[in-house]
Amino acid sequence: MTRPAGPGWLIQGVLPYGEGPRVDVRLVDGTIVEMGTDLSAGDCQVLDASGQVLLPGFVDLHTHLREPGREDAETVESGTRAAAAGGFTAVHAMANTDPVADNAGVVEQVWRLGAEAGHCDVAPVGAVTLGLAGVQLAELGTMADSAARVRVFSDDGLCISDAGLMRRALEYVKAFDGVIAQHAEEPRLTVGAQMHEGEHSGRLGLTGWPSVAEEAIIARDCLLAQHVGGRLHVCHVSTRGSVEILRLAKARGIDVSGEVTPHHLLLTDAAACGYDATYKVNPPLRSQDDVDAVREGLADGTLDVVATDHAPHAPQDKEAEWGAARPGMTGLETALGIVALTMVGPGLLTWRQVADRMSERPARIGRLLGHGRPLAVGEPANLVLVADTAWTVDRRQTESRSHNTPFHGTTLPARVTATFLRGVRTASA
Amino acid sequence: MTRHLLSAADLTLADATLVLDTAAELETILATSSVGKLPTLRGRTVVTLFFEDSTRTKTSFELAAKRLSADVIGFAAKGSSVSKGETLKDTALTLEAMGADGIVVRHSWSGAPVNLARHVRGSVVNAGDGTHEHPTQALLDAYTMRQRLGRVEGLKVTIVGDVLHSRVARSNVLLLHTLGAEVTVVAPPTLLPVGVGTWPCAVSYDLDAVLPTSDVVMMLRVQRERMGVSYFPSSREYAQRYGLDVRRAERLREDTIVMHPGPMNRGVELASEVADGPRSTIVAQVANGVTVRMAVLYLMLGSAEPAIGVTL
Amino acid sequence: MSPARGTPRPVTGDRAAARTVVTAEQVGRVVDRMAHELLESVGGVSDLVLLGIPTRGVVLARRLAARIEVFSGAQVPVGALDVTLYRDDLRLKGPRALASTELPPGGIDGRRVVLVDDVLFTGRSVRAALDALNDLGRPSAVALAVLVDRGHRELPIRADHVGRNVATTLTETVHVLLAETDGEDGVLLGPADLPDADLT
């Protein structure tokens, strides 16, 4: 599966979950075998990580690896290399590839490519409907039973807008503990939409994408999930109204989870002034009030996970008129830094909570074995080391094949210094 | 430093006044001139880059440039490399290589002139981008108001129609505010942008309430296609509630003028008799368009540096 | 950028370092002499039109017309001819606002036009004025009257009526002051102007 384990590691002086006192951690044969102070090196390679924070390896519930179909923008190999650099030990690869991942053949291909590359585990997401057309269910059960063990199903990029179909999908995947991840966007409210509908869209002459298009679908789907007893996950939550609906749904005991992207934790719709399509994304960047709301939601756990929605694009798809450009931003390599800047720095999340939002909960939602595990002896060595070293994002220096990051020139207060996948170091800074 | 005219907001009061005053001088000179041409932009290359069809505006700009003796190159999107999939960036680089001093661009995507301006050294003049802006239209409208009513400051201007999709409305609201006019926009709620409350103008759904106090009534074109997606139920109802028919025109003050950027839907937003009547400035607007565009081209390309516009 | 239209260009450079080369009283006598010269020119002042080059050229033209009327009773039409759009050095300088062009009633076709300006220097303004005149009509003849000729011609142009010859170096500037625009009459000779001064 992955590379052979190789010699063990002795990682010195780390703070598990950012909490003291410092400990040394020994990894042998892909497992944490010892944690203590002043451990001897033995046969292990030594890594002096004094004062760094040790967290379980991050799990991304929402990544676009573009292979098969758009290998000019990203491949499974380059995308997982970027993921490892960002501290991820597992990523869920969205199904809107070409061909669409709506059958066992494509999901197994993607899963195998990930295994061969060996940078992180790839859990392919299966499309809910054939060809993402929103009409007929894909063979969800066969995908679940395949070597790829698909548990997360999504038509992301498109909304499952037919209420009847969404109901059936939520019901059907119960049989194999699956979850439907909805891209919440009522299509009839977003015809021709280019950016958030608000003060700026009117002035800029760009058709607006109203918040209610997201909120209405989330409300409907939560009630459907409640009705059929199914499991719902909401992709890239971006508005205050959406957070409030999720809070209410959870209070009612509905089995729903929500994710927020790093860019929605920081950027607002004002970024569209100037028509730089680097900032064009779906769902769009919203108002400062929405940014405040999603940060509060992530802090109090209403939003369960940070998911990057890493969306690499070739230059000609971004260096174009706003209306002609494709939406999406890269995010694997900057996610940790943005979370540190927007949540840890201001005291909205502790590092232990970061472990929960970026590793434990996403692993649980995706039903991923071996990831999001406690930092304890006997657990698989899927780990990430974080240092509070400031660094400035340079869009030309990325592992990802694409450079459409909205954070070029931004200084981030923390960085990933090493990532371990079952005891093998997959990234180092 | 290259400067561009991309939005009416790029013009300060001084800049806008300079354009109008320059246009007035040009009008005088050309009226007296037996040749009808000035040598001022000789040796300058002006490219008209029209990605969207428009005979009216394109001809207006080409005439303006030619009357200043500039070399004019018309680049129409259909049949050019653009229709073969060439990107805006590559078109820009081609123009650069050709040494265009001024590029007049009309595009169907909002913001395209801004993107273009990033890749060229010449001055970009926005001749209409999507539903964003059309600054020279606002300038010629203001010039026409000044011509007929002697001033712009303090005028009560009412703009009626599909404000949501109108670049003419956006540019006019901004420029008229700069020039000190009081603007009211009138439209059905479906044709007003969500953020219109933050614009420097008043808003009304009731045309009859606003007409009696208006000095200028500017009618915007309403696209019938909008009916298909329920912006309004029918042309008939639209015309009844928001059309300037003969009955409404009779209740206007004596000096009130009626404007329209063209092309117009006779009988929908404007009755034929009103369009052809003495209050109407429609024909004058077209003539003034050439003069005002001459002024803009002169001020941007006539000297070592542009006198107006924004730097990016 | 150059001042708004209608406003004469202010005296720049160090005023304190400039010296008077023609006093107010002398300016008055010079203008009178020029008016008499025009009256004595071939054809007199019948068919004559004075076209001033803005700004001070227009003031001077009005003054000449006024003195001609005092001396002879004849009313000579006065107009203004802005030459900005015809200048050959536009590209070299910062942007300029346009001044007014007003042809007098009766126009210029078939009449004798006297261009009037305050200072004659390189001759380029006059060349531009001749081009502008050419596009505006067909005068029967064109002559030039200037208050000050400071030499350093770059084109084969000479004035028919000169108020004063003032010898200058290229680094000096000549300022003509006229009561109507500057509060007093006079001609000053001073050190170099700021970089975007006109070369007339």
Image: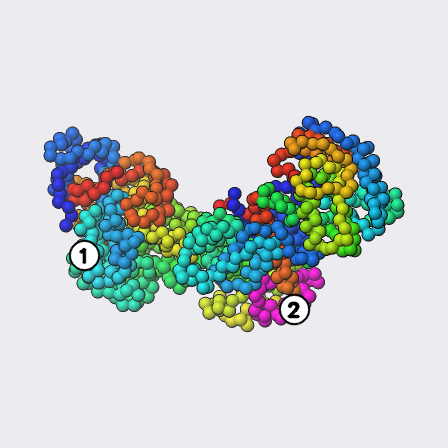
Q: Residue at x 74, y 29 (%)?
A: C20
Tell me the residue at 37%/47% (across/down). Answer: A406
Determine whether the residue tagged by mark 1 lies in a helix, strand or loop.
loop
The three-letter code of the residue at mark 2 reads: Asp
CA separation in Å, label 2 and label 1 = 72 Å
State which quadrant residue B239 falls in.
bottom right
Q: Which residue is mark 2?
A: B276
Magenta residues, start to end: B250-279
- Judging by the rendered image, the residue that carries numbered circle 1 is A148
Q: Is residue B238 above or below residue C92?
A: below
- Chain label for disc 2: B
Query: Tell me, what colour scheme is on the image?
Result: rainbow
Q: Position of residue C154 (x, y in %)?
A: 66, 40
- Label 1 crowd bin: few (<14), some (14–19), many (20+), radius 10 Å: many
Image coords of residue A407 (percent x, y): 37, 44
Mostly what secondary structure, the magenta segment? loop
The mark found on residue A358 in the picture is none
Q: Is residue C15 left or right of residue A332?
A: right
Residue B142 can be seen, yes or no:
no
Nearest the viewer among C127 and B259 is: C127
Q: Report the front residue among A94 and B14.
A: B14
Q: Position of residue A410 (x, y in %)?
A: 37, 41
Badge 2, how many Cα within 10 Å: few under 14, some, many 20+? Answer: few
Say above or below: C86 vs A131: above
Position of residue A10 in the picture relative to residue A179 (left or right): left
Q: Residue at the location (61% across, 54% down)? A: B68
Q: Is residue B94 in view?
A: yes
Depth check, mark 2 against mark 1: the one in front is 2
Mark 2 falls on what kind of element?
Answer: loop
Q: Is residue B157 left or right of residue A324?
A: right
Q: Chain of mark 1?
A: A
